[in-house]
Amino acid sequence: MKKKSRTAATNLSLFLIALPGIIYLLINNYAPMLGIFLAFKNYSLMKGPFKSDWCGFDNFEFLFKTKDAWIMTRNTLLYNTAFIIIGTVAAILVAILMCELGEKKRVKFYQAVMLLPNLLSWVVIGFIAYAFLNADTGFINNTFLRWLGLDPVAWYSTPGAWPIILVIVNLWKNVGYQSIIFMAAISGIDKSLFEAAAIDGASKLRQIRSITLPLLKPTIITLTLMSVGRIFYSDFGLFYQVPQNSGAIFATTQTIDLYSPLTYSTGDIIDTYVYRGLMELNNVGMSAAAGLYQSIVGFVLVLIANQIVRKLDADNALF
């Protein structure tokens, strides 16, 4: 009886600790799902969400009859695939380098410096990028390009440069945080493995290739699967704040969340599509349809990716 009462008390304590998080999850993640039905309605502000006329799949038909669906899907997938691959490789590289430094004070200092960008708002990062890229007073045009004897570039009117710029900015902001996860995984590796390898004459590179990377495999697979689950969700702040909402480069900076009918070929992603559909076009039904399309495809991609991992290595699958 005493054991049962202690177990019940422990479970109750753990439940109370988790309760604020559960409430937040229900309100923030699950309650908005009730609005899914708006994707199948011809929403009218006068009639409200419940009395608006049903339109079936007309919102989806309108979305897929235009080239917007292909453009925003392409941009969202390509950007997030680049973020996942380049970000993972960079984070692993940084984590390995940090672990090789040895001295704790130096490691903590470098960790703090690399983590700082992750704590900054995208609004602040947008202005930092503007200080570098401004055509008249920017650091790159007035210092770097001038030293090289090159003509200034109007970055906010040059769509082709923005895929590279956005990847670099995303990497600068997130690689410090991602590297901490891999550092924790590396710290959990038995040090005797490295000592035995060193005694056998293995170099640092050989130790990394034969010990560190294979033992990081479960962490890499888990984080990659979780990233694939959000591959259809772009970072709204990155695609909206950093380009300064410049119309000339929407073609390369717009995702499913930000949409503009004028300049979408290279920058529209799903998140920006939904945002512009609501804020500029006031098309609630089509925005809801795009959001539902985003969620369903993301869910299917997680199932496919997990199934592939299960066939290759069942122990590392999520479920």
Image (spheres, helix red, strand yellow):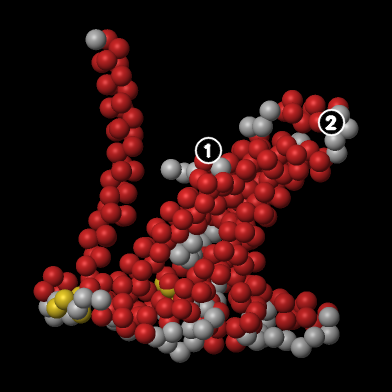
Residue in view at x 30 percent, y 12 percent: 3
Residue in view at x 59 percent, y 47 percent: 220
Q: Which residue lies furthest to the right in this view?
A: 201
Label 2 environment density (alpha carbons within 10 Å; few <14, some 14–19, many ≥20): some
* Residue 80 image point, x, y percent: 54, 64
Relative height, residue 277 to residue 203 (above, below): below
* Residue 211 image point, x, y percent: 73, 37
Residue in view at x 36 percent, y 63 percent: 296
Relative height, residue 78 to residue 208 (above, below): below
- Residue 32 versus residue 143: which sits nearer the camera? 32
**Which residue is tagged 1?**
315
> Is residue 248 at all visible to an observer of this figure?
yes
Q: In which quarter of the image is the C terminus?
A: top left
Taking the image as shown, residue 167 lies to the left or right of residue 316, namely right
Taking the image as shown, residue 294 lies to the left or right of residue 203, namely left
Relative height, residue 151 to residue 195 (above, below): below
Q: In which quarter of the image is residue 49?
A: bottom left
Residue type indicated by callout 1: Asp
Question: Which badge, 2 or 1, comes first in the chain's sequence?
Answer: 2
Residue type indicated by callout 2: Ala
Q: In which quarter of the image is residue 143?
A: bottom right
Kindly identify which numbered label has been placed on residue 198.
Answer: 2
- Residue 271 versus residue 58: which sits nearer the camera? 58
